[in-house]
Image: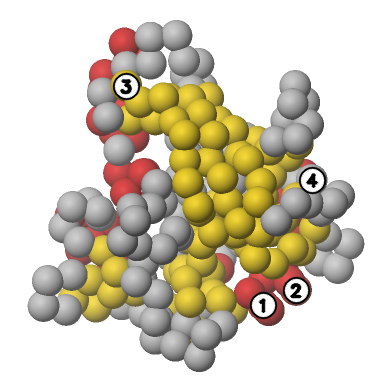
């Protein structure tokens, strides 16, 4: 997600010519609290990316589907083990996912989705965003990565974060996956620590805490 967010400055620099027919939405500034986000979603799940099938232009996805394995269900109207999440166009809160190579495991996300009105067997992200990065902690529990990216939450989740050690290979960033400005800010605030050739996240929010934040009705 952090890498994806770093692309947006480049995407909008190129303008409509990038997509050539894909819809370009302006969702800049949209923000929401967790309870409202959970209420708006038809489905809330922890899922892991298995594969993606995207149309790319200039190296960026502009339309297509991702296929994710459902790990934990928090809210649903009945789900298969593997779901399809479809996205089209370019906008700040788009719902595309990095495709794992054969040598790496797919990233895990806490997803907030709605059924696609045109094809109910697949899902779409919400206008405010669809995914929060989730990492595996050293005790094999799941935690939302702090700071969160991908959804502009009004909840101050950073205030609830606790120091954690992660066993997840996706708990690190390189100079290529995070902007210099963000990296320096995270290092200064203690959200990242530097290792020999990368940077590692240091805080998370346990998913058990997330259950309380969204409310029992969700």
Query: Do labels 2 and 1 touch, CB within 8 Å?
Result: yes
> Which mark's residue is nearer the viewer, 2 or 3?
3
Front residue (pair 208, 62): 62
SS state under label 3: strand
Label 1 to label 3, Cα distance in Å? Answer: 39 Å
SS state under label 1: helix
Q: Quadrant of residue 153?
A: bottom right
Q: How many marks?
A: 4
Q: Which residue is mark 4?
A: 42
Rendered residue at 51%/29% (across/down): 64
The correct choice, above or below, for 213 with respect to 84 in the image is below
For marks 2 and 4, the one nearer the N-term is: 4
Rendered residue at 23%/71% (across/down): 199
Q: Which residue, as the protein is rendered here, is positioned at the far left? A: 196
Q: Which residue is mark 3?
A: 57
Q: Which residue is mark 1?
A: 209
For marks 1 and 4, the one nearer the N-term is: 4
SS state under label 2: helix
> Which mark's residue is nearer the viewer, 3 or 4?
3
Q: Is residue 103 left or right of residue 61?
A: left
């Amino acid at each position: 997600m952090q890498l994806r967010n770093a692309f947006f400055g480049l995407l909008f620099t190129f303008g409509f010519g990038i997509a050539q027919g894909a819809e370009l939405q302006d969702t800049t500034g949209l923000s929401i609290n967790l309870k409202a986000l959970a209420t708006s979603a038809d489905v809330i799940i922890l899922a892991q990316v298995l594969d993606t099938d995207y149309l790319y232009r200039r190296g960026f996805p502009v339309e297509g589907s991702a296929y994710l394995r459902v790990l934990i269900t928090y809210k649903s109207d009945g789900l298969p083990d593997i779901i399809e999440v479809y996205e089209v166009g370019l906008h700040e809160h788009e719902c595309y996912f990095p495709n794992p190579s054969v040598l790496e495991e797919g990233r895990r996300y806490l997803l907030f989705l709605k059924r696609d009105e045109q094809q109910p067997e697949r899902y779409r992200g919400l206008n405010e965003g669809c995914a929060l990065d989730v990492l595996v902690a050293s005790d094999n529990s799941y935690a939302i990565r702090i700071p969160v990216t991908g959804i502009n939450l009004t909840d101050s989740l950073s205030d609830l974060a606790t120091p954690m050690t992660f066993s997840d290979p996706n708990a690190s960033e390189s100079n290529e996956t995070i902007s210099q400005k963000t990296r320096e800010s995270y290092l200064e605030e203690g959200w990242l620590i530097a290792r020999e050739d990368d940077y590692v996240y240091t805080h998370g929010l346990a998913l058990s805490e997330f259950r309380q934040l969204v409310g029992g009705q969700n």
